[in-house]
Image (cartoon, rainbow, N blue to C red):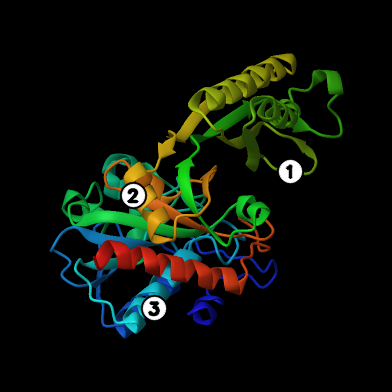
Amino acid sequence: MWADLGPIGRDAGSGGYRRFAWTEADRDCRAWFRSEAEARGLTYEVDRNGNQWAWLGDPMAGDAIVTGSHLDSVPDGGAFDGPLGVVSAFAALDELRHRGVEFTKPLAITNFGDEEGARFGLACVGSRLTAGQLTREKAYELKDGDGISLPQAMERAGYDPSAIGRDDERLARIGAYVELHVEQGRALDLTGDAVGIASAIWPHGRWRFDFRGEANHAGTTRLVDRRDPMLPYAETVLAARREAELAGAVATFGKIAVEPNGVNAIPSLVRGWLDSRAPSPDDLDATVTAIEKAAREYADRHGVDLSVVRESFTPVIEFEDALRDELGRLMGGSVPVLGTGAGHDAGILSSVIPTAMLFVRNLTGISHSPAEYAAEDDCVAGVLALADVLEGLACS
């Protein structure tokens, strides 16, 4: 499975993946998922929000145990973030069949669409729609960098966007959702454990900073006459690092758009996107407030206008204690429990159904990069741990 999925959407130059929602690479990933489902005799379907499902047992019976993740990527992302959870789900099912267990509950494997938000700027679109955290009206307003709206992209990919939105009927089928994911950090590497259990997801959000100045000639405009928005933006990037360190948080300006974007032109607009995450809501609020305050001071100093828009926000997510504890028991009882600053579909769905997560060790801690890596032995340990969990939840 890993070898078959590996080439899809891989950029020859960077070695990273560009599997963006409703593109050709996404189509090929979806075809791979369907092929794996049908090869195992599973009932395949796509829900109203474009998420894929593969069912063992009656999909309408209720109290189903669901596992899976996503197959899309960030720009030039790694091979493991998302796909490891989907591949491991199919492999865990193979393991359970090899064990000869009898299922007493339906089991489903899923691929949630557009988890990374690389194309339309909002993460976890498929699960947000399903859980009702993203309305149809707001989803219709999402556009990519070329001005193509989400419904247009879905239509071009052969899907009907008219019914997207909260899916109570599907949620009612699910008893619990367990997502396996490569760890996006080094906690397990530092403890020497191959697999861990998630305790919580830090609160996190994305903010857009628009610095508006005045375009002018780079060679003839005196420095004192300039209203250059690049200067307060650059100072704000440094302020974000400083304020994050003070609060024990993280803050990153990882995306920027410049107009008119000419080598010999002073910009009229510098638009930067801030991603910030922290252990608590108060820490996150303090970090972003301090960054915005500094940005406004820098903008005023350079005669530049500034607007700040919060584009997305996810509060702190504590995974259900009972389910988390049950995972630990099924895995032998001595499994590390760790928090994470990364968002996941399991976090979104936790507001409407019981969810839990397993993490597989990442030896380098690198993620969202072509250098992302998990050793094969650790991946196998993750599959076996997931199989133990599914057996305990769906075969009891």
| The image quarter in which residue 60 lies | bottom left
- Quadrant of the snapshot with the C terminus: bottom left
Q: Residues within 10 Å of mark 3 (few under 14, many from 20)?
A: some
Q: Amino acid at mark 3?
A: Glu
Q: Amino acid at mark 2?
A: Leu
Q: Position of residue 218 (x, y in %)?
A: 82, 34
Question: How far apart are the alpha carbons under marks 2 and 3?
Answer: 22 Å
Q: Is residue 330 above or below residue 233?
A: below
Q: Is residue 113 above or below residue 43?
A: above
Q: Is residue 360 left or right of residue 363?
A: left
Q: Which mark is residue 262?
A: 1
| The image quarter in which residue 106 lies | bottom left
Q: Position of residue 111 (x, y in %)?
A: 37, 63
Residue drawn at the location 66% of the way across and 22% of the way down: 295
Q: Which mark is residue 323?
A: 2
Q: Is residue 89 left or right of residue 219?
A: left
Q: Amino acid at mark 1?
A: Gly
For the question of whether residue 258 can be seen, the reply is no
| The image quarter in which residue 300 lies | top right
SS category of the residue bearing label 2: helix
Q: Residue furthest front?
A: 333
SS category of the residue bearing label 3: helix
Q: Residues within 10 Å of mark 1 (few under 14, many from 20)?
A: few
Q: Mark 3 highlights which residue?
A: 95
Question: How far apart are the alpha carbons under marks 2 and 1?
Answer: 54 Å
Q: Is residue 349 left or right of residue 395?
A: right
Mark 2 or mark 1, earlier in chain: 1
Residue drawn at the location 59% of the way across and 57% of the way down: 75
